Amino acid sequence: MTATMSKQDRLNSTLTALRGALPELRGVLIATVDGLPIAQTMGVGTDANRVAAMAATALGLGKRINDTLGSGMLTDMSVGGTDGQVYIYAAGTKGVLAVVAPAGVNLGLLHMEARDAAQEVAGIL
């Protein structure tokens, strides 16, 4: 008999798989579109509540920009700095996936893995 995993366990498993595929990531977080953290593997000293709120806000702004420009449904967006980037992915209509990556990360691999993870999260939520 196989045990059924809870939603929380499934979300944590998705984060673990993403971190396993890209071990150089500095952090990964799943939040609601209202900005509440659901699951995270952020670095020590990082306030997951603040990151969740900012990621949800950025996603909302990105959606408004896409709507204004007629660019279709928002899938992802990024914020870059000299030492790294934050990639924010829409996880269906209920969730946000934020990925903190160092400068020089393999973007093709990151987008492939993170988009798959965002779809998994959407299915779980």
Image (spheres, helix red, strand yellow):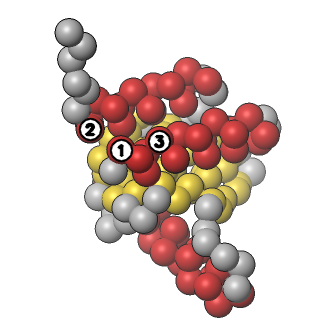
Quick one: 56 or 104, which is closer to the camera? 56
Please, what secondary structure does the residue beneath circle 1 have? helix
The amino acid marked with disc number 3 is: Glu
Residue 35, given in percent of the width and then of the height, sits at 34, 63
- Where does residue 84 sit, x and y in percent of width and height? 68, 46
Q: Which mark is residue 83?
A: none
- Element at label 3: helix
**Label 1, label 2: how many angstroms apart (C-alpha)?**
6 Å
Q: Amino acid at mark 2?
A: Lys
Specify few, some or many for label 1: CA neighbours under 10 Å numbering under 14, 14-19, or 20 or more: some
| Contact flag, marks 1 and 3 (Cβ < 8 Å) | yes
Question: Could you tell whether 73 is left or right of 54 in the image?
Answer: right
Q: Is residue 50 at all visible to an observer of this figure?
A: no
For mark 1, what is the residue? Answer: 124
Image marks 1 and 2: residues in contact by CB distance under 8 Å: yes
64 to 81, vertically: above or below: below
Residue topped by disc 3: 120
Q: What residue is drawn where x is 66% and y is 76%?
A: 72
Q: Position of residue 103 (x, y in %)?
A: 74, 41
Mark 3 vs 2, N-terminal side: 2
Sequence-first tag of 1 and 2: 2
Circle 2 residue: 7
User: In the figure, 86 relative to 6: above or below?
Assistant: below
Q: Would you call the spot at circle 2 few (<14 residues within 10 Å), some (14-19), or many (20 or more)?
A: few
Residue type indicated by callout 1? Ile
Question: Which of the 4 image quarters holds residue 15?
Answer: top left
Measured in 3D between alpha carbons, the distance from the residue under mark 3 to the one under mark 2, in whole angstroms, is: 11 Å
Q: Give the tally of numbered discs.
A: 3
